[in-house]
Amino acid sequence: MTEELIYDILRQGLWIAVKISAPVLTVALVTGVAIGLFQALTSVQEMTLTFVPKVAAMLIVFWVSMSFMTTTLVGFFTDTIVPQIIGGAR
């Protein structure tokens, strides 16, 4: 296994991590900004108002995108990682 191959697999793994985490992190960002704007407009400074809706939205998006995440990870492992473990050529 060459150094270039290791860096290529690492780059692919990091890109997969970005693709998998993007939906959940985007929803957390949008929900946080919306709740922050609501709090600024109404002067309501309740800590649970920021936490509970954000976690609920993240859980819903995680549940909806779970098949995409699983398919992406399984594809990465079966196409890239497993052939390297068993010694196959890329």
Image (tube, grey):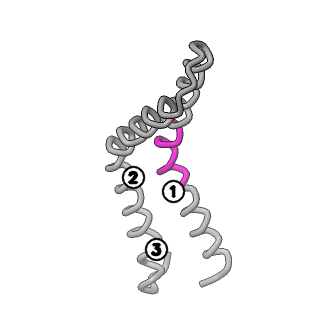
Q: Which residue is mark 1?
A: 16
* Left or right of 14, for residue 55: left
Amino acid under disc 3: Ile
Mark 2 sits on what residue? 69
2 or 3: mark nearer the eye = 2
Where residue 51 sits in the image (x, y, percent)? 49, 37
Q: Are marks 2 and 1 in contact (CB under 8 Å)?
A: no
User: Viewer-proximal residue, 5 or 27?
Assistant: 27
Query: Which residues fall within the magenta stretch?
Result: 17-26
Any magenta on residue 79? no
| Residue 17 to residue 34: above or below | below
Give coordinates of residue 28: x percent, y percent. Answer: 51, 37
The answer to whether 58 is drawn above or below residue 16 in the figure is above
Q: Secondary structure at mark 3?
A: helix
Q: Earlier in the sequence, mark 1 or mark 3?
A: 1
**Distance from the alpha carbon under mark 1 to that under mark 3:** 13 Å
Task: Identify residue for label 3.
Answer: 81
